Image (cartoon, rainbow, N blue to C red):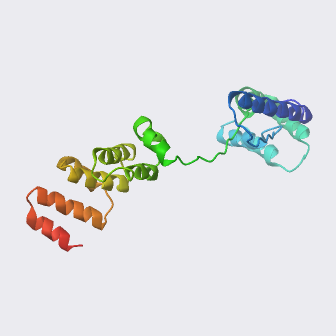
Amino acid sequence: EGGYANNARLAEGRAEALLSYVESLYDFGNARMTVDSEPEDWAGLEKAVEAGNLPDKAELLAIIRADEPADYDQREWKLKTLNGGTSYKILLRDVYPALRHSDYQVDYTIRNFTVDEAKQLIFEDPSQLSLNEMFQVAQTYEAGSPEFNEVFEIAVRMYPNDPVSNLNAGISAVQTKQFDKARRYLDKAQDCPEKQLAEAALLMYEGQTDEAKSRLEQL
C-alpha cells in the first residue's frame, strides 16, 4: 500500500533478513547463496482478485492487467479510488497481508552412501537408503544367510509396492519355506523368469507338482 520505491527497499530488506536467518540456522559450508526480491506481488494480487467475489472484480482485474499506467504507484492509485475505495479497503484487510511474503529454495544433491555406511544404516535407519543401496548391502552377505534374507525383508518393508523388492523378498521367503509370506510377495512382484521359477518351487513345496511343471514349461 506504500510507494513502489519504499516497497522495493522493504522487500530487499526482508530478503536479506531471511538469508541471514537461514544462514544462522544451517551450515551450508561454501554453498552459493543468491537473494532476490519483488517489491510488489502484482501477480499474486491478480490471482487473489480473480479467485475472489468482489462486486467490481472485473474492473479491478482490468486495472491490474493493464499495461498503462506503467507506473505502479499510479496503478495503485486507480485501485484505491475505484468506486470510492470500497474494494481497496477489503484488499488491504484480506489480501495484501499475504502478498508480503518471503520464500526460499534450497537445491542440493544427495550423496550416495558407501556400502559400509549402508550396512550400518540398513539396521539403524533404512529409510535413508535407496533400494539399490539395500541390494548392494545384500550382496555382501552369503546368499541365503540370515543377514542376506533380513536385508530383503527390510527392503520390502521400506518399499512395499516395489515389484523388485517384492520379487527378492518372495524368493527369499520360498527358500526359507515361509510360504504364506512368499505368495504375498510374489503376487506383487514383476513378471519375469525368476518369479516363475519361485512360483514353481512354491507349488512343488505345496505338493502341486503338475501345476509346478506347467509353470516351468512356460519358461
User: What residue do we see at 47% from left, 44% from top?
Assistant: 116
Q: Position of residue 66 (x, y in %)?
A: 83, 49
Asked whether the viewer can see residue 80, the reply is no
Q: Position of residue 138 (x, y in %)?
A: 37, 50
Q: Position of residue 154 (x, y in %)?
A: 35, 43
Exactly how many numbered labels are in the figure? 0
Question: In the figure, is residue 2 to the left or right of 180?
Answer: right
Figure quadrant of residue 210:
bottom left
Question: In the figure, is residue 186 to the left or right of 163?
Answer: left
Along the line of sight, the residue nearer the viewer: 102 or 41: 102
Asked whether the viewer can see residue 68, the reply is yes
User: What residue do we see at 31% from left, 66% from top?
Assistant: 192
Question: In the figure, is residue 178 to the left or right of 206?
Answer: right
User: What residue do we see at 86% from left, 32% from top?
Assistant: 7
The quarter in which the N terminus is drawn is top right
The quarter in which the C terminus is drawn is bottom left
Figure quadrant of residue 167:
bottom left
Figure quadrant of residue 35:
top right
Q: Position of residue 80 (x, y in %)?
A: 84, 32
